[in-house]
Image (tube, rainbow, N blue to C red):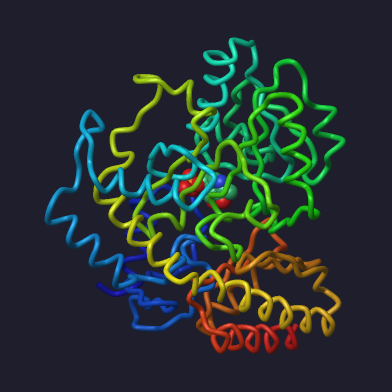
Amino acid sequence: MITSDILSDSHKYIMNTYSRQPLVLVKGRGVKVFDSDGREYLDFVSGVAVNNLGHCHPRVVVAIQKQAQRLMHVSNHFHNEPQINLAKALVSNSFADKAFFCNSGTEAIEAAIKLARRYSREVLKQDRYEIITMRGSFHGRTMGALTATAQEKFHKGFEPVVPGFRYVPFDDIPAVEHAVNEHTCAILVEPVQGEGGVNVPSAGYLKALRDICDKNNILLMLDEIQTGMGRTGKLFGYEHEGITPDVAAIAKGLGSGMPIGAIISTDKAAQGLTPGSHGSTFGGNPLACAAALASLETLLEDNIIIQAVEQNGRHFMERLEHLKEKHSFIKVVRGKGLLIGMELDVPGKDIVSACLKEGFLINCTMDTVLRFMPPLIITTEEIDQLVDVLGTIFEKR
Ligand SMILES: Cc1ncc(COP(=O)(O)O)c(C=O)c1O
């Protein structure tokens, strides 16, 4: 089928919820993807921070193939080994004691919201239900996660939103202190805001939030959906700050492309989630868990990838900083590891299209922030290739 026909069928049969590039991707290997006309691209989007190990990592592919031949799905009325092994690996490599599995980031946030309310009601026996979230956050599209997302543009037309959320500015500790009241059960925050424009809070922010939570007996819940699985140079974003949360929501890079999400939690915070209180048909199914376990093991092996993220992230930022010195329309470069934003004082859409023409996939968020989140296996040379192309595009503006 020729590309124009595929695109025409896409417009005809698929709901119009995304503004997509006119590109049909058919194959991926490592950092490269290929379109239906055989063109090759270097991928600095990674399916929005999902393909952290690159496309079709051989170890993940083999794990999926083996598991698909053995057992793909069983109900959570029964135990399955890949789910248990994945939970064990996540617990061994984090602050957490327990995991709950679902299928996406937004579902992980729903689970976190439910955990927090149940903990307050059933364990603390208090009338606490309110969750404090941060302006500019993004937590997902289902109604609870959508309401947690403190950006009204995402709520528009879907009201009424869910009661029990309070919004405060990001990176503003006095505002959080002021917002806490006798009904607060949790604070939910991204260690680095991704969709909100790659906003990195001041050093000590998570620690100060941890202190507020401890003082008021409320849960600190981190949305590590974008920052987790090595993206910032550590397995989880909180590790940079020397604190531990009570709960973390993860998804995206967890399955290297296999849809899976989870919350990981301390035993204490998880107490309220008793049998029948929450669940998911597909959550923790053997196929997704086998893929996630192979991904996690690969990511952790000798720490190689995570170390490379720190080094390449620094190099990438330095090179983007050089571009900033040359071009006054670049306002700021910021990020952590390989989650990097470049804020412009003009819309970034045309630059995304220009990069595409040159064979590079990049992303733009909040209209003016170019966002770079390549696979963690990207090389310095590949980063240089993109920055050189960006330099040429910027010169022509
Ligand atoms: C920080 C964060 N939380 C939650 C989500 C929602 O995840 P999903 O699209 O898998 O539901 C996203 C997705 O971009 C995200 O970046």
User: Number of callouts in the render?
Assistant: 0
**Relative depth, front residue between 106 and 83:** 83
Q: Look at the picture and state if 89 lies above or below 256.
A: above
**Relative depth, front residue between 202 and 210:** 210
Whole-percent x, y for residue 376 in the image: 51, 71
Whole-percent x, y for residue 137 in the image: 67, 44
Q: Determine whether, in the image, residue 293 is placed left or right of residue 202.
A: left
Quarter of the C terminus within the rendering: bottom right
Q: Determine whether, in the image, residue 12 is placed left or right of residue 48.
A: left
Q: Quadrant of residue 197?
A: bottom right
Q: Look at the picture and state if 200 lies above or below 281.
A: below
The residue positioned 71% from the left and 76% from the top of the image is: 317
Q: Quadrant of residue 58?
A: bottom left
Whole-percent x, y for residue 61 in the image: 26, 66
**Relative depth, front residue between 215 and 34:** 215
Whole-percent x, y for residue 291 in the image: 31, 57
The residue positioned 65% from the left and 59% from the top of the image is: 365
